Image: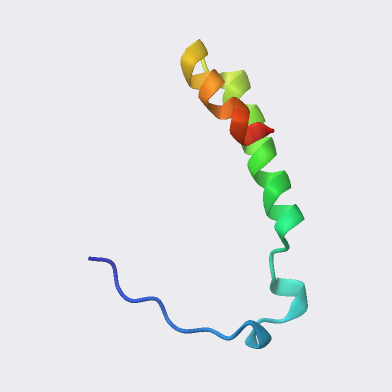
Amino acid sequence: MPPKLPEACLDDIPVGARFQDPRIAAAVSVTCSQLIGQSIREDIAAMFGPFHM
């Protein structure tokens, strides 16, 4: 079992250190695009298509 995560308050995290939702979505989209391009199996590439959208 992994160790219990520490409790954190959102106000304790500085604004510049927070990851915003659009930034996370863009990173996931880029990663999925790279995986689609590098995949040699079409079924695996197709699996990442919905995540890319």
At x 28%, y 67%, the residue is 2
Q: Where does the image place residue 50, in percent across and percent down from the top left?
A: 61, 30
Q: Where does the image place residue 48, in percent across and percent down from the top left?
A: 56, 28
Which residue extends farthest left?
Answer: 1
9 versus 44 height, above or below: below
The part of the image, by quadrant, that contains residue 11 is: bottom right
Direction from residue 47 to residue 19 in the image, left or right: right
At x 64%, y 43%, the residue is 28
On-image quarter of the N terminus: bottom left
Q: Where does the image place residue 15, in percent across and percent down from the top left?
A: 76, 77
10 versus 23 height, above or below: below
Question: How many numbered tags mark residues here?
Answer: 0
Q: Nearer the viewer, residue 1 or 38?
A: 1
The part of the image, by quadrant, that contains residue 19 is: bottom right
The part of the image, by quadrant, that contains residue 34 is: top right
Q: Where does the image place residue 23, in percent across and percent down from the top left?
A: 74, 54
On-image quarter of the C terminus: top right
4 versus 24 height, above or below: below
At x 70%, y 73%, the residue is 17
